[in-house]
Image (spheres, helix red, strand yellow):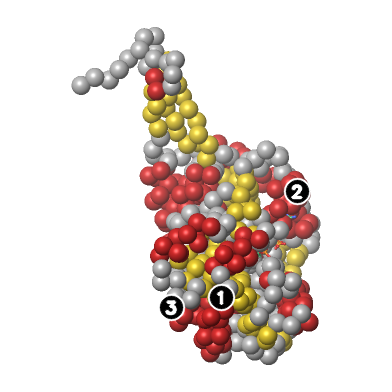
Amino acid sequence: MAGTGVFAELVDGDGVFKYYSYGEWKKSCSGKSVPIINPTTRQPHFKVQACTQEEVDKLMEEAKTAQKSWAKTPLWKRAELLHKAAALLKEHKVPIADCLVKEIAKPSKDAATEAVRSGDLVSYCAEEGVRILGEGKFLVSDSFPGNERTKYCLTSKIPLGVILAIPPFNYPVNLAVSKIAPALIAGNSIVLKPPTQGAVAALHMVHCFHLAGFPEGLISCVTGKGSEIGDFLTMHPIVNCISFTGGDTGISISKKVGMIPLQMELGGKDACIILEDADLDLAASNIVKGGFSYSGQRCTAVKVVLVMESVANAVVEKVKAKVAKLTVGPPEDDCDITPVVTESSANFIEGLVMDAKQKGATFCQEYKREGNLIWPLLLDNVRPDMRIAWEEPFGPVLPVIRITSAEEGIHHCNASNFGLQGCVFTRDINKAILISDAMETGTVQINSAPARGPDHFPFQGLKDSGIGSQGITNSINMMTKIKTTVINLPTPSYTMG
Ligand code: NAP
């Protein structure tokens, strides 16, 4: 149960979850709290503190100070603490999963998997960090014209300082640790602003880092509505880097902040191109898994199917048969399709469905909604004038566009303002490579649905889907700067023998 056992100190006398600063759980002076609405019951389930600007100022100062001594902590020691936190995350997967079920209606098995996967990510990051941060470069000067070998250049990776981490609601634990662990192993301090839906799961995760024994001030967690406290955080002068995952909010943040490195993982409209020679059963299974897992609320969900006309009927029939088997209901029952995160999300999805209906899409199932629960829906014969052809529903609704050539599929994919991932199904590897190269997306999967993991693979979006690249190694590198020291010799010196 959330907020019990070792997590009891997270809750104040009024049942509000506290924020985390300087190694302590605290009540905000604002006296205000933010309710977290359970997507299934649509009733308030938890409350978190609405932190004030003064509280943010204080923990930013603490983060700045703590980082200076953390940067002097040996790499092996940083890794050791991360391994401890990883073990604690796995040990406490049940209460963390319980929060995810109540806050974001994640099916219970997936919720437990998120906690375990997060522990694995933290451990891998600790291992990778001690290797890649333990290496630098050595350069000599005489490779550049006009120079003799009088200069030896040593390069190493140094931390950036204070990293602000802002994850989205759909993986509030995993997408938080994917920022926290690389930041810490690289010698940075971290200020986390969790999504409001998912904040309590994130606070439980932070407590695992607390129990692992990280120094005071190194990790802080501020709660409150992004729309109220977000600008103050992102434009705070102490912040040296922002790692953000979410929707269009990331685009507006990137326009407001100053000269600091940004890691932005934003929305997607991942296309699934199916050629005539594809294994249609494999394609259909991947469409259902890719399009409907966690009710389509995944950045890398299949968000549009672009299928060759000649095999379209067969693919649609196979997908329909599999959709009919999806279970629909509460996350506690581990149903495949659970309520979407908020009523406004459900309304937005419904708007896309009604637009497609009005413009003549074929409904493969009857549209059904109860509260935030939307039954899985496949829309066939979608045309480019329909909103669903371009917009990200972030729900269990999947459009199918029939195409007459691979080029038409590539064109649709590239006409999107997003460029996160895509996939292509064909038995011809040469065609697959040509299509993959032509698709303007950060990743293309051949014969499988788009996916963010395994977490050490590079993960990035082009165009409005992001800035920079994630994945454990890339995130560690992104959260460091190169420092060089040049040794100037009085006379050229060459290593002999
Ligand atoms: P969102 O509305 O953009 O929110 C993301 C985070 O930003 C939340 O923590 C939110 O806090 C915070 N926020 C809101 N306003 C802010 C502001 N003015 N300044 C700073 N932070 C602010 O996204 P979401 O609805 O949580 O997540 C869904 C989106 O994320 C989808 O578009 C999906 O594709 C994308 N996503 C992308 C990836 C990827 O790796 N590319 C992965 C997962 C999800 P509050 O909750 O308090 O508002």
Figure quadrant of residue 415: bottom right
Q: Position of residue 66 (x, y in %)?
A: 57, 41
**Residue denoted by label 1:** 307
Question: Earlier along the polypeptide chain: callout 2 or callout 3?
Answer: 2
Amino acid type at image mark 2: Phe
**Where 89 falls versus 23 (above or below)?**
below
CA distance separating discs 2 and 3: 51 Å
Indicate which disc, 2 or 1, sits on the residue closer to the N terminus. 2
Which quadrant of the structure image shows residue 387? bottom right
Label 1 crowd (10 A; few <14 / some 14-19 / many >=20):
many
Q: Residue at x 46, y 49 (%)?
A: 473
Q: Quadrant of the C terminus?
A: top left
Q: CA distance from mark 2 to mark 1?
A: 46 Å
Q: Position of 307 compared to 79: left or right?
A: right
What SS does tag 2 mark?
helix
Residue 426 shown left or right of residue 409 in the figure: left
Name the residue tied to disc 2: 232
Q: Which residue is mark 3?
A: 279
